[in-house]
Image: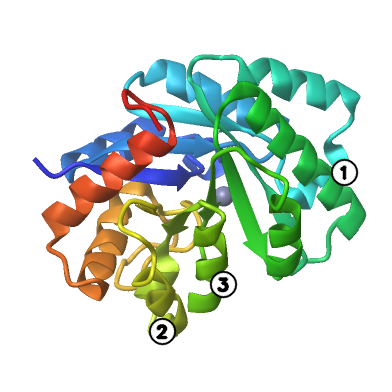
Amino acid sequence: MTVFFDTHTHLNADAFTEDVADVIRRAKSVGVCQFLVAGYDLNSSYRAVELARSYPDHVYAAVGIHPLDAGDLDTETRCAISELADDPSVVAIGETGLDFYRKGYAKEVQGEAFLWHLDLAVKHDKPAIIHVRNSFDDVLDNLQQFDGVAVAHCFSGNRSEVGELVKLGLYVSFAGLITYSSGVLVRGALSSVPSDKLVIETDSPYLTPRGVNSRRNEPSYVVKVASVAAETIGMNVDDFASMTTGNARRLFGLGQTR
Ligand SMILES: [Zn+2]
């Protein structure tokens, strides 16, 4: 059976509070059986762990503070996130990174928070989930000294940028952007990622893929992302699903060595 792994969803967001069990059931009914729920602030990090405990072997958690909330990373929050990072259901640190697109915290504040998360990832031997928005060169600079494992989530850049990330050994995750008619460059980038570094995600509730008749995105739609991605690289969807699910499990250290 074809099994998909949504490597970045926010089932911990308010948008899913009412019906998360239905959302998970719907996803499983189309083969989306594994989910990485990424934290973006302290509450959502706790919620990610709670969901992972409720759905063992299906939901896995990441804990961290989103770059747009980087200023919230005070001493108390650092302690809480570090403590959560010890939980066996936590398989990654994030999401972290840099976001200079929206009006947010200063570069220095975001940069310091990013480095703190990278350091935490290394200490816990867990991969970092990296958000990059209008910040590619700065993210690259920050990664030069990093010798852990990481994934660039919701990649939106071009072929030469993805090449830089691949050179650093990163995994690269693609979301609904590749399904848009405007996604020509990002599809070009996708086709140049080595097959063992490629993973897929929804970033739900955001970024609904093209052709989905719902404002809210959800993990079941990762199948749409997979079908466009598979077509882009000339693979059938079943093979693509088993390849990317295997990559995701290796990335998150689930039952295989990295
Ligand atoms: Zn996210």
- Give SS at disc 1: helix
- Three-letter code for the amino acid on which mark 3 is drawn: Glu
Residue designated by label 2: 184
Separation of disc 2 and disc 3 at Cα?
A: 14 Å
Front position among marks 1 and 2: 2
**Residue 222 vs residue 166, the one in the foreground:** 166
Q: Is residue 19 visible?
A: no
Up the image or down, 91 lies above or below 182; here it is: above
- Label 2 Cα neighbours within 10 Å, binned few <14 / some 14-19 / many ≥20: some
- Three-letter code for the amino acid on which mark 1 is drawn: Gly
Residue 152 placement, left or right of 108:
left
Separation of disc 1 and disc 2 at Cα?
A: 35 Å
Q: Is residue 184 visible?
A: yes
The x and y percentages for residue 178 are: 39, 72
The x and y percentages for residue 75 are: 89, 25
The x and y percentages for residue 132 are: 64, 60
Residue displayed at 49% across by 36% down: 37
- Give SS at disc 3: helix
Residue designated by label 3: 161
Front position among marks 2 and 3: 3
Up the image or down, 171 lies above or below 47; here it is: below
- Three-letter code for the amino acid on which mark 2 is drawn: Val
Separation of disc 1 and disc 3 at Cα?
A: 28 Å
Residue 15 placement, left or right of 188:
right
Up the image or down, 99 lies above or below 47; here it is: below
Residue designated by label 1: 71
Front position among marks 1 and 3: 3
Q: Which part of the image, by quadrant, shows the C terminus? A: top left
- Label 3 Cα neighbours within 10 Å, binned few <14 / some 14-19 / many ≥20: some
Residue displayed at 69% across by 60% down: 140
